[in-house]
Amino acid sequence: MTTVTRNVIAVLCALALVGFASVVSAGAPTPKADPDALQILKGMTDYLGGLESFSMHTENSYEDVLDTGQKIQYDFASSVVIQRPDKLRAERMDGDVSQSLVYDGETLSVYEGSKGFFAVISAPDNLDDALSFSRDALDLVPPAGDMVYTNAYELLTAGVTSGFVVGKAVIGGVSCTQLAFTTPVVDWQVWVADGGKPLPVKYVLTTRDDPAQPQFIALISNWNTDPMIPDGLFDLKVPATATEIEFVRIDVESVD
């Protein structure tokens, strides 16, 4: 089994779905925001946190800033299925590129179908700890990010310096409330569906610590809060011709 560079691993692991994990800032959760905005956000995270399983689809755009300062926008689609307390499967579709990420309660696996690579590593036995492990040890932000955590509200509000309700909007035919928050590193907005199912339907992340302020945008649709999950969905099946590689651990010093 060969070891590849961190750049190759980054390509294999480019499966960010909503990007909420990028919002997390250092420090204790001390939100300085409009109480109405915080209440709506907490209603969203509490609702998601109470779901035993769910699935969704996203259409995503992100900006890459060239050395010249020019921004280039890229698009990809993703789908994700979550089954608590210890299952996740995500797929990314980007033209001819097909990528899969699977967490089965014991291992975390990534398969890059277009390149024929896959990697498998032992992971903690619950989704919260597995998400933290993937980010801290592998530099991998799995799809759904922080909103899958049981303490999602605390993570999302950590480091928030301001937040407010922008107003009402209609996204994809869904009536929702737009919220905007700021941290020292990023600005982020989320559109939360009105009514009995306060689900996120759009998300925008703007990087503040880059002068070009690139954005990540996700439109979230096809929510299913009680999906039929077939047997074997959380088993990663790869062709016999696929090449196994190793994750690069960023929490372990390399030995020359």
Image (tube, helix red, strand yellow):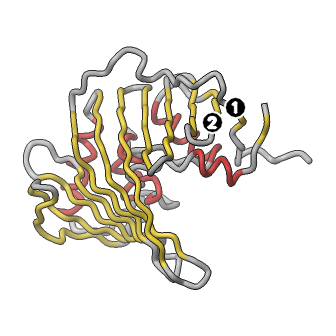
Mark positioned earlier in the residue sequence (1 or 2):
2
The amino acid beneath tag 1 is Thr
Residue 47, given in percent of the width and then of the height, sits at 22, 40
User: In the image, 128: left or right of 246?
Assistant: left
The amino acid beneath tag 2 is Gly
Residue 44, given in percent of the width and then of the height, sits at 23, 48
Q: Secondary structure at mark 1?
A: strand
Q: How many marks?
A: 2
Dots 1 and 2: beta carbons under 8 Å?
Answer: yes
Q: Considering the image in quadrants, where does the N terminus appear?
A: top right
- Please name the residue shown 15% across and 52% down the image: 193
Please tell me the numbered disc located at residue 210.
Answer: none
**Can you tell which quarter of the image residue 171 is in?**
bottom left
Q: Secondary structure at mark 2?
A: loop
Viewer-proximal residue among 44 and 56: 56
The residue under label 2 is: 116
The residue under label 1 is: 243
